[in-house]
Amino acid sequence: MTFLERFLGGEIRAEDFRHADHVRAGYELLADRDFLDAASAYCRVLKMMTARIGKPEAFHLTVTLAFLALIAERAAMERHAGFEEFAKANADLMDKSALARWYKPERLNDPAARQGFVLPDPAW
C-alpha cells in the first residue's frame, strides 16, 4: 500500500504524521488530482485525524490551504521525479515557518484563519 493510499484511508496515526508528511501528502495528492479535489481530500483526512485524537481544533484551514497552494505552485514550476527530489529542491517547505513570508503570526493565530481561509497579509 502506498503512502497516499494509507493517508487517504486514514491509516496514518496523527501522532506519527510530521510536517514533512503533510508536505508529502499534499505533493502526492496534487500529482493525482486537480487542486480543488486535492484540497477537499486533504482537508477531509486532516480533520478526521485531528478528530480521532480528540483535538478537532488543531485543524487549521488557512495553513492547510496555503501550504497546499505553495506545493502546487512549486510543483508546476519544475518537474520532479518524486517527492524526495521535490523536497530537496524545496527545502524551505519542510519548515513549518515557511508561511511567515506571507502571513504575520497574529493573522494565522486568529480563530478566523483556523476556521476559514484568510488571504496573506496585505503589503506584507
Image (cartoon, rainbow, N blue to C red):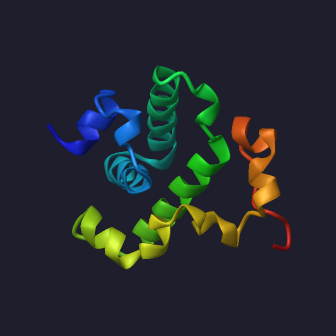
Question: Horizontally, is 49 left or right of 58 in the view?
Answer: left
Residue in view at x 74 percent, y 52 percent: 108
Location of residue 81 in the rendering, given as x and y in whole percent from the top left corner: 22, 69
Q: Is residue 87 above or below residue 106?
A: below
Question: Horizontally, is 4 left or right of 60 in the view?
Answer: left
Question: Horizontally, is 57 left or right of 44 in the view?
Answer: right
Location of residue 9 in the rendering, given as x and y in whole percent from the top left corner: 30, 27
Looking at the picture, tell me which residue is in the foreground, 109 or 86.
109
Residue 8 in sight: yes
Residue found at the far left of this picture: 1
Q: In this view, does 120 lie above or below 61?
A: below
Q: In this view, does 90 lie above or below 53?
A: below
Location of residue 7 in the rendering, given as x and y in whole percent from the top left corner: 32, 36
Looking at the picture, tell me which residue is in the foreground, 104 or 71.
104
Residue in view at x 44 percent, y 54 percent: 19
For residue 106, which quarter of the picture?
A: bottom right
Residue 79 in sight: no
- The total number of labels drawn is 0
- Quarter of the picture containing the N terminus is top left
